Amino acid sequence: MPQVPIDVSPDFFAKAARFDAIPLIVDFWAPWCATSRLLKGELQDAASAFAGCIRAIAVNVEDDRHLSTAYAIDVLPTLAMFQNGVECWRQSGVKRAHLIEDWIRGRTSCLV
């Protein structure tokens, strides 16, 4: 399992959100969004601390215009966590890596 968020297609995301057994952290972003680019580095740092405990992916909402509507993404960037097919947490905007780590740790059994 990669230690950093990987860019995936909307179809891959939909399948992973439904079927991943481990917590899935999703970065909904767009290439034109400056804050999305800022969050990418912070999420990369945070996700590496949880290698093997979570899967982190990034989904470009521009690749499928219906994605934003289907998941009610109205602010970019948005991080969401899915477990066992259910979205269990969401936050929007840029956060520092240590705050993302706290956010993940508070919602999973990951102990790092």
Image (cartoon, rainbow, N blue to C red):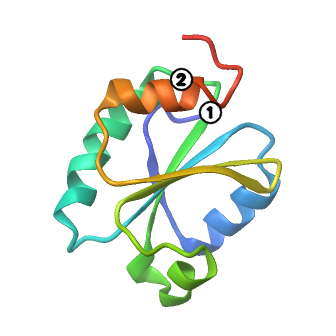
Which quarter of the image is occupied by the N terminus? top right
The kind of residue on which mark 1 rests is: Ile
Q: Is residue 2 left or right of residue 111?
A: left
CB within 8 Å, label 2 to label 1: yes
Name the residue rendered at 55%, 88% in the picture.
66
| Residue at image point 78% right, 55% down | 86
In front of the other: 57 or 94: 94
Q: Secondary structure at mark 2?
A: loop
Q: Secondary structure under badge 1?
A: loop
Indicate the position of residue 50 as horizontal and vertical percent values: 53, 23
Q: CA distance from mark 2 to mark 1?
A: 6 Å
Residue 99 picture quarter:
top left
Q: What's the residue at 50%, 84% (across, down)?
A: 64
Q: Report whether 112 appears left or right of 19.
A: left
Q: Is residue 94 above or below residue 50?
A: below
Q: Which residue is mark 2?
A: 50
Q: Amino acid at mark 2?
A: Phe
Residue that carries the numbered disc 1 in the rendered image: 54
Q: Residues within 10 Å of mark 2 (few under 14, many from 20)?
A: some
Q: Residue furthest left?
A: 34
| Place of residue 54 in the rendered image (x, y in percent of width and height, measured from the top left) | 62, 33
Within-10-Å neighbours for mark 1: few <14, some 14–19, many 20+: many
Tell me the quadrant of the picture where the C terminus can be found.
top right
The outermost residue toward the top is 112
In this view, 100 is above or below 24:
above
